[in-house]
Every structure is written in structure tokens, then in C-alpha cells.
Image: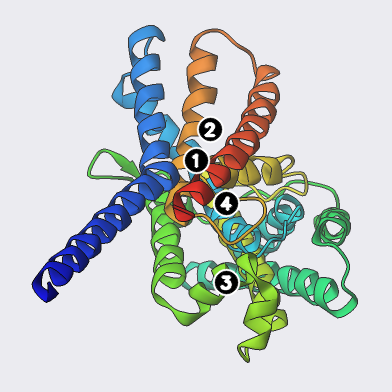
Amino acid sequence: MRNTDLSEAAEVARGRRAAAIWNDILRFAMREAGIAVALVLIVLFFSLTAPYFATPENFLKIFVQIAINTVLASGMTVVILTGGIDLSVGSVLALCTVVGALIMTDRDLPVALSVPLALFGCMGVGALCGAINGFVCEQWKVPSFIVTLGMLNVASGFARVTSNNSTITGLPQPFVDFGNMIVWGVFPSIFLIAVGVILIGWFILRFTVFGRLIYAIGTNEEAVRLSGHAPRFYKIAAFTISGLTAGIAAMVYLLRLNVGSPIAGVGYELNAIAAVIIGGTSFSGGKGSIIGTLVGACILQVLTTGLQLFGAGDNVKPIVIGTVIVLAVVLDAYRDRFLRAIESR
């Protein structure tokens, strides 16, 4: 009798392990693999139907065009994981391009010094703007939507005042040459910078205590507080990271377009949010992946490029982006219900 009970218990345990493995596979398919499959299918569709889509030159163009949005969206992912939103990244990018361009066009500074100073200047200004966003949100419990909307206008105004409402040209030639570099004949240098930012963000979110707490805050902030951690610090840090990546994106912008502009980044916040949501990060926070954000940025750009090759003008792009955001949010709601049903079994 005892042997029978033991065999039944072992059978139940094996069944539970199998169910757990199957649930993990379903979660992965819903959160990660499904997005990658969607990207592959979209690429195949346009490769078969759109003229000149499946060419090395076109793929090189796509890599170039997704770099800025990928960097911006990496920081946006951290904020959305906590349940917040950052609408100021586009204007912060514009301000940082002006700061970086002013530093690099200072003829009293050698190129070897001006470029690193410009990088630190962009990152510093961006991080400061992000930290202000986070501090105001947490100190006075103002919704991040309102605070970052205010910072959008403040940063835009500072960009116009600092640049005297004009574009700044004449960046150092070595800097321009680096921005035009194609590594191994396939990858633009600015795309590799974007991939580097994504990998750093993935490591932080996946393997550090900070990353686990970012997810935990988005899932249950009160539980994090009761465990002895201060959500306030981590939420301010999340906005600071978003501003920091906006500063890095500004340097990528300068590498790509070679000008500092007070009107750079208009609408970039929408593209960044779209990449994050399409990439599987939940608007409610606590669920998502920065690797998914990279895939989301690729999907967005592939759709835009494919439609352009079909003859659709730039006016169609905002329609596509807005539609995809709405669809992604709706699908996210159904996906959450499905995952909850899996976990309750």
C-alpha cells in the first residue's frame, strides 16, 4: 500500500513538473517568441511583395533608422516597467543635441577632448531632466504623464533658447566619419551602439537586484515597500535612466544627422512608447523585456519602410504607429488574461 502511494505521489509530481514546463513555454511564446515570429513574418511579407525591400541597401537603411528609437525606447522600457510613462524624451533629446553640438563646435577644444565632453554633457543633461521628472512625481505624487508633459515643454524651450533657435553645424570630421562607418560591411556604427545599450539594459534588468525590484514595483509596489525597500528611490532612478538614454540617443542623432537642432526629436516619444508596447511590455508595469523592445523597434521600422516602398507617404506613418499602439495594448490585455489563466491552473 505504501509503495502504491509513493508511486502515485511521484506520478503527481511528474505531472506538475510537466505542467510547469509547459506553462513556461507558453509564457515565453506569448511574451518573447511571438514577437520575434511576428517580425519574421512581416519581413517575409514585404520581401515577397514590396519592390527593393529584400536588398542589402534597404536593410542597412533600416538598421540606421532604428538606432535612435531603440536607444530612447530602452530607457522608456524601465519607466513603463514601474508603471510610469515619460513623454519628455523627445524634447530632452533635442536639448541634448544642442548641448553636444555646442561643445563639439567649440574651437578652443581639441577633438579628442570635445567628443567625450559632449557625450558626458548629453548624458548629464538628460539624466538631470529625468531625475527632476522622477523627483517631482515621487515628492508630490503627481502622475508621471503630467510631469513629463511639463518637462517636454521645458526642455523644448531650453533647447530653443540655448541654440538661439537655430541649428548647429560644423561637427568635427572624425566624429562625422565614425557616424558613417559600416562595420563588417553590414552593421552601421550607430546600430551597434544601440545594440550595446540594449545589452547593458538587459543585463541590469535580468541579473541585478535593481532590475528585479523594477519589475517588482510594477507588479506590487506595496509589497516592495513592506519588504524593506524604498520604491521612491528606484522610481526616480528609472526616470533618470530614461533621461540618460535620451542623452545617449542625442549623440546617436548627432552621429547620424551631424547637426544639433532645437526641433529634433519631435514625436520621438510616441515612437519609443510604440516600440516598448509592441515589444510586449505591459502598460500596467511589471511585465516585459528590453530585448522585446528592440524587436518592437524593428517591427515599427520594417512596417514604415515597407509601406513607403508600396508608395505610402510620410503622412501615413503616424496612422500606422497609432493603430499599432492601440492594437498592441488590446492584445496585451488579452495576453494578460491568457497568462493569468495559465498560472491559475
Callout 4: SS: helix
Q: Are marks 1 and 4 in contact (CB under 8 Å)?
A: yes
Q: Is disc 2 in contact with disc 3, using a CB cutoff of under 8 Å?
A: no
Q: Is residue 181 left or right of residue 109?
A: left
Query: For numbered disc 1, what is the local secondary structure?
Result: helix
The x, y position of residue 258, in whole percent, is 57, 46
Amino acid on which the number 1 mark rests in the picture: Gly
**Which of pointers 1 and 3 indicates the residue nearer the eye?**
3
User: Counting other residues with Cα less than 10 Å from the Cα at mark 1, is it few (<14), some (14-19), or many (20 or more)?
Assistant: many
**Going from the N terminus, do you reach mark 4 or mark 3 first?**
4
The dot on residue 216 is: 3
**Mark 4 vs mark 3, CA separation in Å:** 20 Å
332, 142: nearer the viewer: 332
Q: Which class describes the residues within 10 Å of circle 3: few (<14), some (14-19), or many (20+)? A: many
Q: Secondary structure at mark 3?
A: helix
Is residue 219 or residue 343 the one in the foreground? 343
Q: Which residue is mark 4?
A: 73
Q: Residue furthest front?
A: 1
Residue that label 1 marks: 296
Q: Residue at x 77, y 49 (%)?
A: 262
Q: CA distance from mark 2 to mark 3?
A: 28 Å
Q: Which residue is mark 2?
A: 300
